[in-house]
Amino acid sequence: MNLRPDPTFHASPKLAMQAPVENYAFTVMLSPDGSQSDGIAVIDLKPDSDTYGQIVHTVMVPNKGDEFHHFGWNACSSSLSPLTGHAFLERRYLIVPGIRSSRIYVIDVKDPLKAHIHKTIEPEEVFEKTGYSRPHTIHCGPEGIYVSTLGGAGPDGTDGPPGIFIMDCETFEVIGRYEMDRGKQDKHYDFWWNLPQDYMVSSEWGLPPQFENGVVAEDLLSNKYGHSIHFWDLRARKNIQTIDFGENYQMALEIRPAHDPTKSYGFCGVVVDTTNLQGAIFTWWRGDDRTWQAKKTITIDPRPEKPENLPPLLQGFEAVPPLVTDIDLSLDDKYLYVACWGLGEMHQYDVSDPMDPILAGKVEIGGIARGTKHPNGKDFVYGPQMVEVSRDGKRVYWTNSLYSTWDDQFYPDDEGGQMVMARVGEDGGLELDGDFYIDFPKGLRSHQIRLEGGDCSTDSFCYPSV
């Protein structure tokens, strides 16, 4: 424990943007068939280094079949909240859950080149203390580590709804469930909060039988995946309002609130509109009457395609859906990045006016029936997926795997894992860096990225920018 707050904790987004740039990235490597162990790759991001853009260390876990997906830090800027009792923690440990095994690894990355497993939490502890399974998204809060889950109890994770549980941020012991009153919430995916305003927002994907063996076409076409977001009183742990986007807006996934804690709005990405295969972004906000509202503000059209060029799942539609699978918001709340995993496109929207986003830039790479190569001439399989924006907003990193069984459905002829980076223009716009290209070891795919010193997807700020 430090004697003063970790210097990578920042009270406001503006201070975070002025902090030193990232030196390393930590990226998930997963074995799609469980024949190898999953792991974390440490990637050198120092431009003047002889190993820039290379994997310089790996942490491979001893078990197989975990399927790493999302992961996050043990502590972040939320530790500077006046409510916290943990202001002197270090941003030192990565909390890495296995979405299939329900096992959780705590990895010490204080020295990135000597990163190692600090503790393993076996699934039985998660089951016994929470009644949840399939841990998914990690956020560090003032009083502990919050972990969202995709499954409830029982072998198939459907004995009761999934939810959020809390871990001790020093001992890493599982404490118990978060929810006191979940209201209408019966599925789960992402969540995020605004600490000073004391609210949280959560979203929905589907239950384990709906995603573990691939997308269930019948459930998708009958609109049985998640299509709502839920607003919570953060401290009371109570669902105070649910907004249903409409049952055709299937899979309401990533939640991205404005970073400025004085603002009461944010964005949610929707994978597909089953009436027309469009992708969508909804802006949500709190009205003058203190109730929450939401409106679709971005629509992304599918691309017509010959059936013979499509995977079997899409041949009847004769089109490639955008498949919006991840979004990320720059720390100045100006640019929203939208990964269109199906089209093979990364979009940049100017959201200075969150009710009227404007497309400011676009990169094409990968994609169904397209397979656009990297500027260096090498393949980028699948499409842009997990996206991470640097604190200063000048670099955007992304990888390509969605979820092993879904990769195989939508890209049945592809295999591999890559990570790339695009540079952001002074007035917006995106351009792929032709020299930055990570090709992960054979048999391993790449998923989420976390940047050393924190990033736009993990920190919750306590004070407004000045």
Image (cartoon, rainbow, N blue to C red):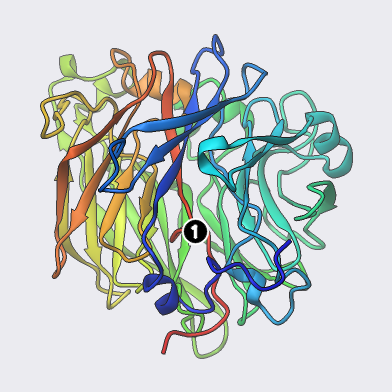
Q: Which picture quadrant has residue 430?
A: bottom left
Q: Nearer the viewer, residue 144 or 8?
A: 8
Q: Which picture quadrant has residue 393?
A: bottom left
The tally of labels here is 1
Name the image quarter holding the N terminus: bottom right
Q: Nearer the viewer, residue 196 or 242?
A: 196
Q: Looking at the picture, does residue 354 appear above or below residue 171?
A: below
Q: Looking at the picture, does residue 76 appear above or below residue 87?
A: above
Residue at 37%, 24% (x, y): give it.
440
Residue at 75%, 38% (x, y): give it.
152
Q: Is residue 307 left or right of residue 53?
A: left
Instruction: Bin the neighbour count of mark 1 within 10 Å (Cα to Cα): few under 14, some 14-19, many 20 and up.
Output: many
**Residue labelled with disc 1:** 454
Residue at 78%, 59% (x, y): give it.
179
Q: Nearer the viewer, residue 430 or 285?
A: 430
Label 1 is placed on what type of residue? Gly
Q: Secondary structure at mark 1?
A: loop
The percent position of residue 383, horizontal first and vertical second, equals: 28, 33
Q: Is residue 215 visible?
A: no
Q: Is residue 203 left or right of residue 317?
A: right
Q: Nearer the viewer, residue 122 or 44?
A: 44
Q: Is residue 114 left or right of residue 317?
A: right
